[in-house]
Every structure is written in C-alpha cells, then in structure tokens.
Amino acid sequence: MDTIFALASAPGRAGVSVVRISGPDALSALSCFGISTLPQRLASLRMLRTSDGEVLDQALILFFQAPNSFTGEDVAELHLHGSPAIISRTLHILGDIPGLRMAEAGEFTRRALENGKMDLSQVEGLADLIDSETEAQRRQAQRVFSGKLGDIVQVWRKDLIRAAALLEATIDFVDEDVPINVRPEVQELLFGVEASLREQAAGAEVAERVRTGFEVAIIGAPNAGKSTLLNYLAGRDAAITSSVAGTTRDVIEVRMDLRGLPVTLLDTAGLRETDDVVEAIGIERARARAELADLRIYLLEPGEAPKFPLKHEDLILRGKADLFDGAEGVSGITGQGVDRLIDQLADIFSARSALVATATRERHRLAIIRALGYLEAAEAMLNNSAYGEDVIAEELRSAIRSLDSLVGKVDVETLLAEIFSSFCIGK
Amino acid sequence: MKHSDFDVVVVGGGHAGCDAAHAAARVGAKTALITLKMSGIGVMSCNPAIGGLGKGHLVREIDALDGVMGRVADKAGIQFRLLNRRKGPAVQGPRAQADRAIYKAEMLKEITDCPNLSILVGEVTDFVIESGRVSGLVLADGSKISACAVVLTTGTFLRGLIHIGDKSFPGGRMGDSAANLLGERMESFGLPLGRLKTGTPPRLDGRTIDWDILESQPGDDAPVFFSFLTKSTSTPQVSCGITHTNEKTHEIIRANLARSAMYGGHIDGVGPRYCPSIEDKVVRFSEKDSHQVFLEPEGLNDHTIYPNGISTSLPADVQEEYVRSIKALEEVKILQPGYAIEYDFVDPRSLDNRLAVNDVPGLYLAGQINGTTGYEEAAAQGLVAGVNAAKDALGQDPVTFTRSDSYIGVMIDDLTTRGVSEPYRMFTSRAEFRLSLRADNADQRLTGLGIECGLVGPNRASIFRAKMDRLEKGRAMLTDCVVTPKTLNKNGVKISEDGKQRSLYQVLSFPDVAIQDLVKIEEDLALLDGETQSQLKNDALYATYVERQQKDTEALKRDELREIPSNFDYGVLDGLSNELKLKLKVVRPSNLAQAGRIEGMTPAALALILSRLNRSLRERSA
C-alpha cells in the first residue's frame, strides 16, 4: 500500500496549515525532516530540518498509530506555519521520498472506508467535499491549461500519443503495412517532450510563487542596516498591503505590492558566529528562511565576504549608503538607492513571472518529474538494441499515466485511433 | 430442481461453441452441443489461420485451462510463425496457418471423444422459460430439450444478411441459413441489440496462380506451438505467398465504388477499422499505390487460396476484374466471391463477468454474438461461458478472470464494462499488465486455477506440476547465489563496478545476459533443461516491471474482491448523480474495480458505493 500525503487544510496563507500523511511509511517519512521517534496521540513541538540540516519550520506533530486514526492506517499530521514557501517545500520533500505520493481527491476517505472507519452517512457528507475538491482540481487544471500552457500541453499529448502509437503499431501489427523501425521518430518525439517538460518543471516553482507571492530575504551581518531598510520600505504607505510580524520566530515579514506583483520581505537575524544559544537559533532560522526565499538581498560591508551561499540573481548591496558618499549602495535612512532597488526587484520578478506560462502546483511538478524519469529510461533503451519495444512501450505508458492530470487520459482506444488513421491496417 | 435432459446445452458448433461445450463437460456437467449440421462443427469461416498478437496469447490461455483450440490448431498447423520473435517474449504471439479439413476433423474428434458431451443436430427456434429462468430450448421440429443453463454461440447467424455488390440475402455464413426466429426471440428479452458487419475476400483456385514469380513466406524453422503439451508438427509444412495490389487494381475499384454494398449504402452495420475492405483501403489511403496481399493455402489437399487483405463487397464481376489485375493472379479463377455480412449482436454490457445475461437467468452468451470478431476471442469467451454455465447448473462457485491474470480477463472486462463500437479484437496493447501476461507463462498464470476448478485434467496437471518444480528449483539456484560486480566481470559478465551485490536472478534480468553466461558462477545451472532455462530468463527479464506494477495489481485485486451483488440498488445512494446511476445500471459492474472503470466515475461515487457495500456486509453478518 502506498503512503499518501496532502495538504489537509485550505491552500494559501493561513496561521496554521496541516499536512497529513497516511500509510505504512507515515512515521519513517518524517526522518526526512530529521524526526525519528514520536509519542502516539500527543502533540510534539519539533524542528523540521531538511536533509542538509537546515531548519524548515517549527511544527506541531501528531502521530496516530494504526488502527486508531482517521484512515485506520499510521497517520502523521504536521501543523506547520502557514507560509506557502514552507508548505510547498514540505510537500516537495515528501514527494521526493520513494513510496510516497500525493493523495488523490477522496483517497483519505477511501482508506478510512476500507478500514471501517466511516459509515454511509459520514461518507454522504464527505462526498460533496470530495466532489468539490475534484471539481476544484479540475477548474484549477483548466485555468492552468488555458492559454499558452494549454498549447504546450496539447503538444505533449499529441507527441506522446504519436510515440506510443508508433511503438504499439510495430508490436501489434507486424506483417501489416507499418514502418519496421520507428525508433528514430519515437526518439525525436520523446526528446522534444522531455525538453519541454524540463522547462516546465523548472518554471513550475515560479508559477507557485506567482500565485502566492515572492519572498525576498534581507540578510547580512548584524547591524548592516537590514531592519532600517525594511522599515523604510514599510514606511512607503502606498506599497504596503499588510504587515505580519513573525510571531514565534524572529523573522519579520512585510508584504508589499511591487508593481502589481505580491512580494513578501523578510528581515532576518544578523549572520555571525556566536556562542549565545538563543542567538544561534535565531541565526539558524534566518538562514533557513533566507534559503527558502525566492531572492536574497545581501547587505555587505566593503571587503566583507558573504557568509551565505548566494544564488543566481541574488543582489549584493552596500548597506548604510548614507554613511559613505556616492557609493553604490542603499540606505534605509536617506532612502538613497531604494528606488533603484525596487526597480531591480520588479525587473527580476517580472522576468520570472514571464516564465510562468507553466504548471502551477506541486502535483504537476511531481507528475512531470515522474514522467521525466520514465521518458529518460525509454530514451536510453531506444538507443540500445538489447531492449525490445515491449519494455520501451512500458516506460512510455508509465510516463503517459504519470501525466494523466496534465495531458488528459490516453487509453488504448486513443492509441488505436491514431494507429488506424496513420497506417493502413488490414491484412 | 426438476430433472433436466442436460445440465448445459450449448447452441452452435463454431469456435465459441466447441470450447464452451468442452469446458462445461470437463468440469463434470452433462452437456449437449446443438449444431445446425454435423459438418458445421469446427468450421473456420474466415481466414485459415489461428493466433497472432494478443490472439495467440488467448489461445495459450485456453490451452493452459485444457481447452481445445490450441491442441486442435497444432494438429492442423501447416505453417507456424512466432510473431515479434525479435521484440521480447511479452509481445511474441504464436500464429499458424491451419488446414481447414484437418482442423474440422480434429475438432469433431475432440468433441465426440469428450466424456459428458453429446452432439445434437437441429435448429433452435426458441427458448423455454420457467419462472423467469431459461430452462431449455425448442427445436424447429417442435421438440424440446430441457437444461439448467444455455450457452448461445450463434456467431453471425442472428439475422445474418449477406451482401455481394447490390445483392443481399439472409444467411449466417455463405451456404448456411440465418437464425431469424432466435433473433426475434432475443429481441423480446429486451436486450440491447446492435448491428455489426464483417467481410471476406474472394476464394481463389491455387492451381491458377503463378506461384513461381511470387515472394514466398515460409514458416519458422523451429515451430512454436499453441499447446504447452505439443512437441512436434503433425503435418507437412507449407509457405504462403505475398503479392501486391497496384494502381490498375485501385482504378478498377474506384470506378466501381458505387456498386459496392459498403459504398452503395446497403450496409448499416459498423465494420472493424483493423480489417477494412479493399474498397475502404483504396478510398481512405488514396495516397498508397499498393497494398500487400497474403496468399494463404486453406489446406494440404485443398487448392483453395485465401487472399488475406482484399475482403470486399463488390459485385462478383468486379471482384474478378480487380483480382486479375494483381501480379501472379492474372489467370486466377475465383471459387467463391467475397462478401460482407451484417448481423445482430447483443450489447455485452448486459452481461456479467461470467458472460451470463444479467436479466435472463440461465442464459450465457459467447463469441461474435457479443460483438467480438476472431476465432480466438470466440473460443476464449466460449470457455468462460461454458465453465460458468456448468458451475451454475452444478451449484458451484463461478470461475472468473481478471485484467491482472489473463487476456481472457482483459477481454471479458472490456466487453462487459465498455461495450463495443466496432467488432472487438484482442491486441496486446489492451492489456495494461502486458509484461506479466505473456504467452510463455500462460500456464504459470492459469493452469493452477484450472486444476482448482476442475477444468484441467490429470495429465496436464501432472506435467504442469513437474514443470513448476523444475522452475522453482532453477529460480532458487538463481536467487540464492548473490555476487558482486567484480565476480561477474571476472566470469565474463560485463557489468559496471557499482559495488552493488546482486542475485543471479537480478543479473539475469539484464536483457543481454543469458543463463549460459552464469554457468561459470553457478555450475548447477547447467543441469537445468533448455525449456526451464529459457522460461527463467523470460521471467527474470520482466521481474523489475512486474514488481513495479505490483502495487497496481494488488489494488486492482482488492477492488475486484469487493463484489457488487447484481441486485445492488444504486437508486438509494443519495450522493450519486443521476447520470452515474444510469451508467451503473446499464453496466451493472460485478465488482468495485469494474465500477471504477466506468467512464465519468468519481472518487466520491466509489466511496459511496463502497460504504453501502460495507454496510450490507455488516448487516448480513449481523
């Protein structure tokens, strides 16, 4: 039995979001967050860490051992802080664990039913919910697949059907008037689909952010002028949409509307070596949040080397520009360089959101990643005559099935229709 | 129950009828096969060949259950070819040209030699119905035969209509009358009927063909048989010829399209896309200036040639003209013109997975009457209907097949869940577990089940058990021996030095490794016989895929075990849309897996059905 997981609370920003995991690997999956043992049916406050040891979030975790749970299986619930970045990262990590997969609509209910945890009247109540979830997913998919992305997906569908039909034709219609070696054409088709899938997989995260907003972390040594800069930005009444102080963490969040793009600015604890335990925790959180953010602004002293691995397009600026004359820098006191900074941020995020003709949800990303795995295997086999069309076709089938939710169902009738319209079958 | 003349009566002596009657008799039911005439038993009315892709798989499965088609085809085989020999064992399908006369004679012998089985000659005109259940048949002479269950395998005979050009006349097959009275009676049951058509090519006199200038297609040097028990051919082997249509052929056809029954608008039935008439090919693929034609001998002592690829419903004079435009057929004599036939079929969604009619207890349908085409599809259905009619009559548990255990299961599920829009033919692409459902392991998949339900006799059972023992022993040798890449490389098996320990069974799963390559490492492997060695190779080759699909098959099996009673009331389920309720009532799924495959089914709807099932289960056990 697969272990399944899903966001069990409403998507988007919220105080608390709940991710539910159900199945035999529910507990062992948590080891990916550095958690091994948990008491049963008791709330435990734990630090979730990524495999690199970075702190992802502090979460309340509940563990219910089978059969005493909602589904009757082992169930773990992660009560996370409701930041889209944290949730998306959590789902991302879970999705990458072998044997785990995202739950389909109604799947938790289905398991509860299988294990006698629900009766008809409860199900009738839930049926509407499941239907609306299914419907919401369908509408979501429709939104995603309208316009430019819709066209891309149609090409995937067409090319995958063609590739599968070619292979199936050589399998099921030998002795008929079909090409004998279809491998070059299949290869070309798969190559194109793979490239496009990879592009979308890279863009999918951007798409997620566009809907929920980009996060920008301001980082630097203590007293580099980070908080002053944030306060200055926050003081621009027109820009601020709302302000939420990070309650349990010492990371301050300010939400802004930046030329029409939702952006959240994060002020973090100054980065330095310290023996102070409390400060060390703060610094670790700062690092973790900064790592998760979409972009980092590093305020640097001249001659100082960044204490944080920076990524593509991250900005390195000189803080406290008011203290130095004419230098390329930014000041939260005089406002010097702030307009230029905002321009830069707007440019970067507009460019990133332009990439977003793309799949949005984690579900789609996982689907794409899975499909890519199968397609890559198929491609490798196409080049090796030791592998027969039977196994290549199987990889391709698996790929197409993984992409069901994106390209729509492709069944044997779809393939037969393609075969009969392309080839004159009829010995 | 009152005494009946027979437990099971099978109507029809074609491929479905023969395997139905034989299966019913094998499991111990007193069985009768009724045929219009004795010479109608085992007739191949279309092309003289058995097997192929998907179809060959079906024949292997029939054989694994001790059915008759495989061994009869082996006896009659005059040219054996294993299709897709180079494409991996999962998609290899055995095929053979069969000598019609030998096939018929051997089939008759199987039927007459079978204990519990009698042959009756007569025309069935009506059913006897007692308290809503079919309890017998009425023959044309007015006599009645009582039976606990009836299997109807009337093929294309239900209101069959033969078309040659603009002429048409009733008939079940060329030279045989149609079953019209029975057709009307079927209609009175209120069963949803549809109309399909199929076609045949003209039959040629082989003595008037210029064979010397033709490309010839010989059989395989080492023939692969249908039956797991066959060891050698029974007759001399022959070759087929290959020729091609040409522009002139196509011109003649185009010029006479209006005179074709198909294109003249005389036919309403839907024909198969994979078996188009030559008229269709010329019209739909007008860019092609040539189509290949296989010249298949109908028998060793028969000059008739079946030109596969040019079925037609053009008038006889046009047929002669276009056939004679083809290379090597310039002087050919047509023995019997090609024709199209239209016939009634019953929407198979009105059947359950035993092929029993939902609304008519005691009645089973198999073969073309269910909208399929092909001898193999018919025989496989015959077996399912026959064994279940027998089990029904004997008051024993039904024998059902699933998508994860057999092509038979795939076909029955496709038919009863999705229905048909054209004559249904098996393809390997229909099987989602294709890599597990192979022709080479049909016995491993099904013979055990066959022994359990009584279909398989003691002879095959003991051969099967011995084979399984040998396989088990060989598999243990392979799985018990775990080696490093270093050891493998040292012994000549090239593998990357990834430090991973592997069992020899895992090593064998690499496509380019054969058992012989491993003998240096595990000497005892040399003691295994060739058949066992190659079977182990086939099993290992797909082991990773079978494992990958395990979760799917397990989930499927779980849902298949959740049977939905045929009287299940979908009306009381509040959350179910009317559209789904309607679909469920038409298909009447036998289990939850089948329900899930109905188009438009939602997770919520399945949850509702499941919870209702759970409740009735609890109520029953309470």
Image (cartoon, rainbow, N blue to C red):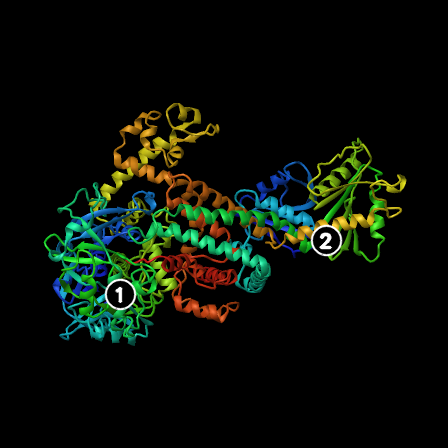
On screen, residue B435 above or below B289: above
Per the image, label 2 sits on a secondary structure element best described as loop
Looking at the image, residue A188 sits to the left or right of residue A385; the answer is: right
SS assignment at label 1: helix
Q: Nearer the viewer, residue A225 or A124?
A: A225
Q: Nearer the viewer, mark 2 or mark 1?
A: 1
Amino acid type of the residue that numbered disc 2 sits on in the rendered structure: Gly
Q: Is residue A123 visible?
A: yes
Which amino acid lies under the numbered mark 1 shown in the image of this protein? Answer: Glu
Pointer 2 local density, CA inside 10 Å: few below 14, some 14–19, many at least 20:
few
Q: Picture quarter containing residue B149?
A: bottom left
Label 2 – label 1 distance at C-alpha = 77 Å
Chain ID at mark 1: B
| Residue B542 sits in quarter | top left
In this orientation, which residue lies closer to the viewer: B207 or A7?
B207
Q: Is residue B49 above or below residue B138?
A: above
User: Horizontal and vertical percent for residue B107?
Assistant: 16, 55
Q: Which residue is mark 2?
A: A15
Query: Which chain is mark 2 on?
Result: A
Name the quadrant of the C terminus of chain B: bottom left
Please give the count of numbered marks on the rendered protein: 2
In the picture, the disc for residue B513 is: none
Say if residue B371 shows up in the picture: no
> Which label is found at residue B251?
1
